[in-house]
Image (spheres, rainbow, N blue to C red):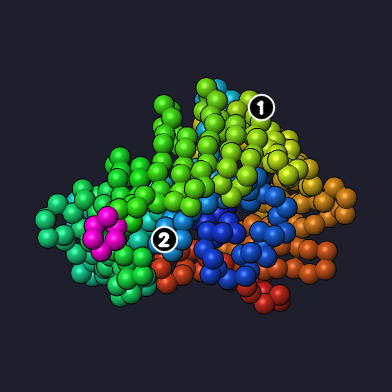
Amino acid sequence: MPYWLTLLPLLFCTLLPCVSAGEDSISAQIVHNLGHVDLWGLPRVRFNLGSTPELSKLGFRFVAIHKVTPSRERGAKSEWQITGLRTCLHQNKGGDMTWIRPDGRKIAFHKINAYKDSVSGWFVRAAPDGIGARLNHANGQEWCYKNGWLDRITDPVWGLVVFATDRESILQASRLDAAGNGRQILKIEYCEFGYVQVMEFSDTKRNVLSWSDDCCLTRIKGGDCGSVSLQYENLLLKSWSTENGNGNKYAWRERRHPAKVFSFGDPPVALREDNDFTYEYGTKVGINYIVIRDKKKGFVSETRLTAKGLVQILPDREIRARYKRAPDGRRILENIPSHQGASD
């Protein structure tokens, strides 16, 4: 596998437009000029399923995100990840701990640092009952985990929220008042395949998700996204449409023979075109590129990826960026002067 492809998993987390709301604008600019795909050539499709004021402020945002995963029969298939439904706190054999937050972000707590993370402001301490751990923040928020799974959250503003879970999967959340009376704010029902079937919120919003026998999401009804219908061909997303007329259609191309082993960061398929854009992939002098063309307006961008950064060529200018390590350990992009190369 080409070396540049091994960098894509790291870059992907930087370039998705809503991974981090406070991300520098350079990443948002790059994504904006990629049409409807990421640098893997995979479509960026996501549907907001809603939340409640309490859960949203605590970091629970429920979004259905399209992914492409390996398929032995056809090389690749579409799958859907729903954010906000899973969270856990685990300890390894060396005593270090890892917190996987509802948004999927991981925070490490090292024994040598007294289980404190100076960047995020969180620290971990043992629970009084000895069978769990508590995450505390200077803002007064506390997350309690039992046997690694979320049990309750105490917040100075929202009070106490308790959770019913099946290991890392959330089944129900209730907000308790000072007298201990609970009010359900979230309820999740799963189908026989283990996928979300019903999602109910306290404000009467209700999502119903329908799945085919081969585990393809075929319909979302209710919630913030209204009603969405989805169609597939050979297990890959072919099109989606909403009741108000929005939608898109996709044509795929194989990147290599489906019988070959799927490698993370090197999907065997990529998007050839959709309603608005065409996508071209290739290599020039050992540098891989993706060219985006608008079907009506013509050339949009050419993005070249190197081991140290990338160059995005636009009709009127160039964007040059290089990788750097953020204080919390994430690999992100920073803008560089136009007279320097991304591989400098």
Question: In terms of depth relative to the viewer, which is nearer, 246 or 238?
Answer: 246
| Amino acid type, label 2 | Glu
Is residue 241 in view from this perspective? yes
Q: Quadrant of residue 29?
A: bottom right
Q: Position of residue 4 (x, y in %)?
A: 57, 52
At x 73%, y 52%, the residue is 35
Q: Position of residue 181 (x, y in %)?
A: 27, 55
At x 54%, y 45%, the residue is 64
Q: Quadrant of residue 311?
A: bottom right
Residue 178 is one of the magenta-drawn residues: yes
Q: Position of residue 73 (x, y in %)?
A: 55, 22
Tag of residue 233: 1
Q: From the viewer's perspective, is residue 22 above or below residue 11?
A: below
Q: Which residues are magenta?
A: 176-181
Question: In terms of depth relative to the viewer, which is nearer, 31 or 301?
Answer: 31
Is residue 344 in view from this perspective? no
At x 41%, y 60%, the residue is 54
Mark 1 or mark 2: whose residue is earlier in sequence: 2
Relative horizontal placement of residue 142, taking residue 215 as reference (left or right): left
Relative horizontal placement of residue 99, taking residue 126 as reference (left or right): right
For label 1, count other residues whose C-alpha is less than 10 Å away and answer few (under 14), some (14-19) or many (20+): few
- Picture quarter with the N terminus: top right
In this rendering, the label closer to the viewer, 1 or 2: 2
Residue 127 is one of the magenta-drawn residues: no
| Pointer 1 with pointer 2, Cβ within 8 A | no
Tag of residue 54: 2
Q: From the viewer's perspective, is residue 229 above or below residue 338?
A: above
Describe the element under mark 1 as helix, strand or loop: strand
- Picture quarter with the C terminus: bottom right
For label 2, count other residues whose C-alpha is less than 10 Å away and answer few (under 14), some (14-19) or many (20+): some
Q: From the viewer's perspective, is residue 239 above or below residue 37?
A: above
